[in-house]
Image (cartoon, rainbow, N blue to C red):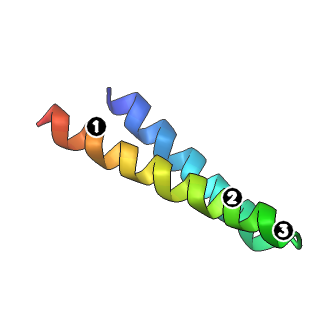
Amino acid sequence: MVDTIKYLREVAQICTRLARACPHLPTTHGLEELAVDLMAKALELERQER
């Protein structure tokens, strides 16, 4: 499970970096939303693991 949590956080960070570099506003918003969702899922899994 630790690997999954780490993976979700890494992908969220990649989405955030892509959003910052993207000139297309709808795509930027979509990437930011995806990053938030991935981080929330990582946190949820982390809490379940305890």
Residue 42, by quadrant, is top left
Is 45 or 24 nearer to us in this picture? 24
User: Mark 3 against mark 2, which lies toward the viewer?
Assistant: 2
Q: Position of residue 20 (x, y in %)?
A: 74, 72
- Do the numbered discs 3 and 1 sit on residues whose CB atoms are within 8 Å? no
User: In the rendered structure, which amino acid carries the disc numbered 2?
Assistant: Gly
Distance between mark 3 and mark 2 Cα atoms: 11 Å
Q: Mark 1 falls on what kind of element?
A: helix
Residue under numbered circle 3: 22
Residue at the (65%, 54%) spot, across then down: 14
Name above or below for residue 31 compared with residue 22. Answer: above
The local crowd at label 1, few if under 14, some if 14 to 19, many if 20 or more residues have their Cα within 10 Å, is some
Residue at the (48%, 51%) spot, across then down: 37
User: Mark 1 against mark 2, which lies toward the viewer?
Assistant: 2
User: In the rendered structure, which amino acid carries the disc numbered 3?
Assistant: Cys
Name above or below for residue 49 compared with residue 24. Answer: above
Q: Position of residue 7 (x, y in %)?
A: 50, 37
User: In the rendered structure, which amino acid carries the disc numbered 1?
Assistant: Leu
Mark drawn on residue 45: 1
Residue at the (18%, 43%) spot, across then down: 47
Quadrant position of the N terminus in the picture:
top left
Q: Mark 2 falls on what kind of element?
A: helix
